[in-house]
Amino acid sequence: MSERKPIESWLTDMDGVLMHEGVPVPGADVFITKLRESGKPFLVLTNNSMYTARDLHARLNRIGLEVPAENIWTSALATAKFLDQQHPGGTAYVIGEAGLTTALHDVGYVLSDADPEFVILGETRTYSFEALTKAIRLINDGARFIATNPDNTGPSPQGALPATGSVAALITKATGREPYFVGKPNPLMMRTGLNAIGAHSETSAMIGDRMDTDVLAGLEAGMETFLVLTGLTAKEDIDRYPFRPTTVVDSIADLVDLA
Ligand SMILES: [Mg+2]
């Protein structure tokens, strides 16, 4: 295997890498500060499509992580970028929150429930039977089905929350149509992000806490991959997968010298 080139830009997952259950991971602040000062292109990634980059900037800021909004990449932004490239200026019926609707407006999409070209499903806390019924009927009538991310559940201090993947499954059962998922592990999430910061996969690294999303997507996008053990994956889990990260470290604190 050939030597990798030096890392010139970084993508990092948010939950389980920079923060865990609302608490910053020790060293995450130093890592982010060092990246900002180095001027290296970087993005903090999340599959959650609920919030805008500005919302997430504020949420991270409250726990002491200073990540500029332009360094945040959500599955909603990736979905909007994908649609803008594939089918610019389209129409969509959207089930989702400001993170998704803002991203779609920003690329010139018109949100409509009158014969839209796409039904786009994202994260929300207020799924209504009426909105789901509307989405199902529009898909039956020919609208293409896109979902921001395939996660079946999301974390909360009280326990699991149903997430976009679970609701997509309901719509799939009712329509017989599978959505196209844009978020991780689709490497499109990384490719659109790299593109947004003018970075190239062969000189970029991805940091994540999950083998089946972060490491897989980074690998398939052609990036160097770092697995941290501060989130969902334990060291003994790694060997169960048919692929490996480039490097396993205890936490992001171990990567400060590379930033
Ligand atoms: Mg994570």
Image (cartoon, rainbow, N blue to C red):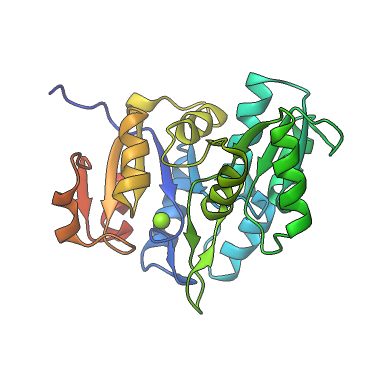
Image location of residue 209, percent across then percent down = 33, 55
In depth, the one of 66 and 136 nearer the eye is 136
Query: In front: 51, or 60?
Result: 51
Residue 30 horizontal/vertical position (percent): 40, 59
222 lies left or right of 141: left
Looking at the image, which is closer to me, 43 or 154? Answer: 154
Residue 74 visible in the picture: no
Residue 96 position in % (x across, y down): 70, 51
Residue 78, placed above or below residue 257 = above
Residue shown at the point (53%, 45%) measured from the top left: 149
Q: Quadrant of the C terminus?
A: top left
Q: What residue sits 72% from the left and 43% below the top?
A: 135
In this picture, residue 167 sits left or right of residue 235? right
Q: Quadrant of residue 108?
A: top right
Look at 36% across and 68% down and name the residue there.
Answer: 26
Q: Is residue 30 visible?
A: yes
